[in-house]
């Protein structure tokens, strides 16, 4: 398949141009798409459904995709299996959900104290990350496409304050990805439960704390009603990437123009999804705090412990196998460069902007 890394400014114009007011064409291809979240989930399920609509419009109806939310076609954490086996032709998700099958997939979502959303996109599109991602998925007969980013997430919702590292010992927390391993090594009991079960688990006392995404999605799931303390920002998810994964046989059965549409539509949705999270997290933050949430920041000694432990976790992950080591080498080299740039440009700009706005 000839690969094109194309970013569209908007999807609206593309849909209108593709549809062109013509009569609905008979579909050549009927696909199923599975995902680990409900179809109505802001930013996630909604944009996955939007992707299906964009593909249909751009193809003039030659591809139609039936979208299934969490549990409707397969259980939430079996989306990769479904795509690999052909139960679903494609899936929407985030790579680290399937890291038990390939540890290197952790890097393509996010890592603790790692890349921001912009930095991750840069590595994927320009720094060789996409080639490595496809190499990892090749063993599964699956082709990945970048589908956007939820940006810097929240640290999570807690029913009790975290004032020191000792407060992490015995903490029961819902947390995904490598952040869960970092906390586990610091004494926490970590679990991964489906998004729709987070608020009920907090309310029932099954967990003491839970992370989900950020102000927009957290508020939509009612997490502010389930826990009192909101820790920001996330140490573990500075820019969580999303994906469209396609069964390789299904993709290669398409003519070249439809293959290009499947990929280009993912790039368009990546832009729209990231913008969606950026805007809605900003405008949801104030109302969330007005709901009586008590905002908290991580204590310095906790950050130091999280950082030390993260270095150990990342070293162990890189040593898992040669493929993971190869991915780690690429990302780590870029992360060092990104951090230097961010210190001199991004961090200093934010300080300057805050000073300027303060008058």
Image (spheres, helix red, strand yellow):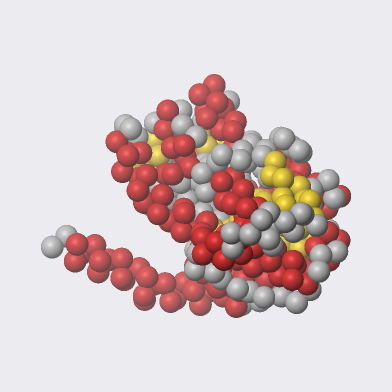
Q: Is residue 111 above or below residue 49?
A: below
Q: Nearer the viewer, residue 97 or 44?
A: 44
Q: Is residue 215 left or right of residue 244?
A: left
Count the marks.
0
Q: Which residue is rendered at x = 72% and y = 50% of the image?
A: 65
Picture quarter with the N terminus: bottom right
Q: Which residue is rendered at x = 77% and y = 51% of the image?
A: 31
Q: Which residue is rendered at x = 80% and y = 55% of the image?
A: 29
Residue 182 visible to an observer of this rendering: no
Q: Nearer the viewer, residue 144 or 256?
A: 256
Examine the image and state in which quarter residue 164 appears: top left
Q: Is residue 355 left or right of residue 94?
A: left
Q: Is residue 141 above or below residue 297?
A: below
Give residue 269's position: percent from left, percent from top. 57, 60
User: Residue at the top extreme?
Assistant: 204
Q: Which residue is rendered at x = 13% and y = 63% of the image?
A: 359
Give residue 5's position: percent from left, percent from top. 63, 74
Residue 144 visible to an observer of this rendering: yes
Give residue 252's position: percent from left, percent from top. 83, 66
Q: Is residue 250 left or right of residue 215?
A: right
Give residue 231's position: percent from left, percent from top. 41, 43
User: Residue at the left extreme?
Assistant: 359
């Amino acid at each position: 398949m000839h690969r094109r890394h194309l970013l569209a400014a908007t999807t609206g114009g593309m849909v209108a141009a593709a549809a062109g007011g013509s009569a609905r064409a008979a579909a050549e291809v009927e696909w199923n798409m599975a995902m680990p979240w409900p179809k109505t989930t802001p930013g996630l399920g909604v944009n996955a459904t939007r992707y299906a609509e964009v593909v249909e419009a751009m193809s003039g109806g030659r591809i139609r995709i039936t979208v299934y939310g969490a549990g409707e076609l397969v259980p939430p954490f079996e989306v990769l299996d479904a795509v690999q086996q052909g139960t679903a032709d494609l899936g929407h998700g985030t790579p680290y959900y399937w890291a038990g099958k390939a540890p290197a997939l952790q890097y393509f979502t996010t890592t603790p104290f790692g890349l921001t959303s912009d930095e991750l996109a840069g590595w994927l599109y320009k720094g060789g990350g996409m080639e490595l991602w496809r190499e990892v998925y090749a063993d599964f007969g699956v082709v990945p496409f970048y589908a956007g980013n939820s940006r810097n997430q929240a640290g999570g919702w807690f029913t009790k304050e975290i004032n020191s590292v000792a407060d992490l010992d015995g903490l029961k927390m819902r947390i995904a990805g490598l952040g869960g391993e970092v906390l586990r090594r610091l004494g926490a009991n970590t679990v991964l439960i489906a998004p729709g079960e987070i608020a009920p688990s907090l309310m029932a006392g099954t967990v003491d704390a839970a992370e989900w995404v950020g102000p927009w999605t957290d508020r939509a799931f009612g997490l502010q009603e389930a826990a009192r303390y909101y820790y920001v920002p996330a140490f573990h998810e500075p820019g969580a990437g999303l994906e469209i994964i396609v069964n390789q046989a299904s993709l290669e059965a398409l003519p070249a123009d439809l293959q290009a549409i499947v990929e280009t539509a993912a790039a368009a949705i990546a832009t729209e999804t990231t913008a969606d999270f950026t805007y809605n997290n900003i405008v949801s933050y104030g109302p969330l705090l007005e709901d009586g949430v008590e905002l908290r920041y991580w204590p310095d000694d906790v950050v130091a412990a999280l950082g030390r432990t993260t270095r150990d976790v990342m070293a162990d992950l890189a040593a898992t196998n040669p493929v993971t080591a190869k991915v780690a080498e690429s990302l780590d080299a870029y992360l060092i460069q990104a951090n230097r740039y961010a210190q001199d440009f991004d961090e200093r700009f934010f300080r300057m902007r805050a000073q300027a706005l303060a008058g």
